[in-house]
Amino acid sequence: MDNKILSGAKKAAGAIISIGLAAEVLQQVTPILIEYFKNKTIDAPPKEKESLVEVPKVDIKEVFITVDDAVKLFKEHDLKPSKQLVHPAIKYKDCTDGEVVRIGSKQGKVKVGTYVSVKYVTSEVIEKSQKLYEESERKKEEKIKLKADQAESKKKKLQETSENVKQTIKEFVPKLTKKEVKKDEIE
């Protein structure tokens, strides 16, 4: 049993000596390392923020921009523009050929190479949009005319009914008075 205690004590003493030596070396080396690195700059690994770019703000409601200009602008900012032709819609009836009508991307900072959708119109889309508008206006006019015709029809029916009621009253009242007179004569 004494051998086990003696063996454990030797190991502990060895560990203490090793720790003491390491502390002594660290005390002597630390000032040298501090002096050495005092005037050195260490190149840090690239941060994720450095690989971010600001998405250019393009207010298409305020500024006219063509699809080619938008593509060029986004490429200059290390983004990947994706041109997308929109489907005809009434809201595009007054646009100009090649005009950007919507930009789909996050605002602020995004990763380099992020896709940005650039939605635009062509003269064909504009023509079809104008036809949609004209068709919509024609349907509105038809609906207004139909409502006016229905109102006129109701008005005529009401007048006819009113005339019928008046005629019935004119015919019925004299008959009533004649019956009353005959009734009075009998009594």
Image (spheres, rainbow, N blue to C red):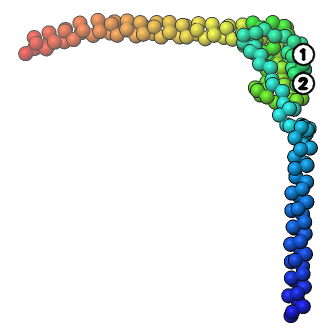
Residue type marked 2 = Asp
**Badge 2 element:** loop
Instruction: Using the image as rendered, state which of residue 132 and residue 183 is in the foreground.
Output: 132
Quarter of the picture holding the N terminus:
bottom right
- Name the spot of residue 158 as percent of width and height, x first: 42, 10
Give me the residue at 90% from left, 85% from top. Answer: 7
Return the residue at label 1. 72
The reply to whether residue 125 is in sight is: no
Dividing the picture into quadrants, the one containing residue 23 is bottom right
Q: Is residue 2 above or below residue 138?
A: below
Residue type marked 1 = Lys
Give me the residue at 92% from left, 44% from top. Answer: 36
Dividing the picture into quadrants, the one containing residue 165 is top left
Instruction: Using the image as rendered, state which of residue 142 and residue 125 is in the foreground.
Output: 125
- Name the spot of residue 29 as percent of width and height, x first: 91, 54
Instruction: Using the image as rendered, state which of residue 14 and residue 155 is in the foreground.
Output: 14
- Name the spot of residue 102 as percent of width and height, x first: 78, 18
**Badge 1 element:** helix
Which of the two marks, 1 or 2, is nearer to us in this view?
Answer: 2
Left or right placement of residue 157 versus residue 22 in this view: left
Question: Badge 2, how many Cα within 10 Å: few under 14, some, many 20+?
Answer: some
Left or right placement of residue 139 versus residue 156 in this view: right
Q: In this view, does 113 lie above or below 146?
A: below
Give me the residue at 19% from left, 12% from top. Answer: 179
Give me the residue at 89% from left, 13% from top. Answer: 68
Return the residue at label 2. 78
The numbered mark at residue 119 is: none
The reply to whether residue 34 is in sight is: yes
